[in-house]
Image (cartoon, rainbow, N blue to C red):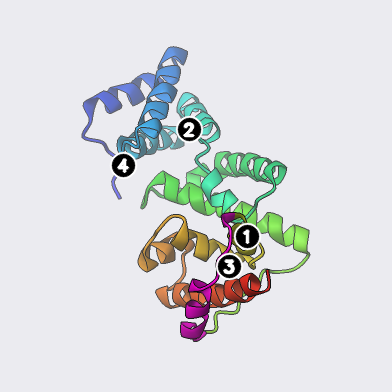
Amino acid sequence: MGSKSPNSQIDRLVADVQTGERRAARRACDQLMDYWEHHDPELDDLLNLLVEAAQSGSDAALEVVLTAIHQLGLARPAITRLIIEPNAVDEVAQATLVKVEANLAKFERRSKFRTWLYSVARNEALMRLRRENGSATPNSDEVEDTATAGRRMSSIVVTRATVRDALDALAEPYRETMLLRVENELEYDEIAAHLGVPIGTVRSRLAKARTMLTERLEFT
């Protein structure tokens, strides 16, 4: 994926940041915030160009990138899909910033920077979970027949809090996959791309997750 933007205003802003002028850095942060608030796709254009500048040795661009990750919470969606406790989320977010700064040179710009950031944050969250659990996360992907389970679930009347509790209790691979499907409304191929797994794995995890949710909700 190319990193050059056709937007000359963005190009000029990045060029100003590369001079190291602090007002330019503040303007870049403000512009990123504006794009974020308005869901503007140019957020990724500006961010990718700033990352490229940082990789080329611009300390000012690196500072803007790290500030944006922190202030906009860019890594948090990946973390909160796996971790709920606020202090733990904050700690993993900080660890992600450290990892990004140390490994930015490894980002090959074949995808959006935010896609790479998602992967870094997700890995940090997984490592946190594994340290806490003292073991690897489950990796069973057996395909389950969930037709009956789906019908049972549709007849269960529960509160949103009860459903959330049941989701939070799912083992990590199933919980994250289900949240991507239910809360983010991603298609199977999009979930597969996010998680870096085959579509068949996504289908089997969702089937297993639905079965486990049904079982938990029936005994609530």
User: Which residue lies at the image location 44% right of the left edge and 24% below the top edge?
Assistant: 29
Badge number at residue 173:
3
Of the two numbered discs 2 and 1 on the same chain, state the one appearing first in sequence: 2
Which SS class for mark 3?
Answer: helix
Residue 98 part of the magenta segment: no
Q: Nearer the viewer, residue 190 or 49?
A: 190
Q: Residues within 10 Å of mark 2 (few under 14, many from 20)?
A: many
Residues at discs 3 and 4 in contact (Cβ within 8 Å): no
Dot 4: what SS? loop
Cα separation, mark 2 vs mark 4, equals 15 Å
Residue 173: percent from left, percent from top: 58, 67
Label 3 crowd (10 A; few <14 / some 14-19 / many >=20):
many
Badge 1 vs badge 4, beta-carbon distance below 8 Å: no
Number of disc labels: 4
Taking the spot 51% from the left edge, 65% from the top edge, the residue there is: 178
Label 4 crowd bin: few (<14), some (14–19), many (20+), radius 10 Å: some
Which of 220/197 is in front?
Answer: 220
Amino acid type of the residue that numbered disc 1 sits on in the rendered structure: Thr
Which residue in the protein does label 1 denote? 162
Residue placed under numbered mark 2 in the picture: 65
Q: CA distance from mark 1 to mark 4?
A: 44 Å
Query: Which amino acid type corresponds to the residue marked 2 in the rendered image?
Result: Val
Magenta stretch: give its range.
Answer: 144-160
Residue at (63, 52) in percent of width and height: 124
Distance (Cα) linking label 2 and label 3 = 30 Å
The disc, 3 or 4, on the residue closer to the chain's N-terminal end is 4
Q: Residues within 10 Å of mark 1 (few under 14, many from 20)?
A: some
2 left or right, relative to 68: left
Quadrant where the image shows the C terminus:
bottom right
Q: Which circle marks residue 3 in the picture? A: 4
> Which label sits in the foreground, 2 or 1?
1
Mark positioned earlier in the residue sequence (2 or 3): 2
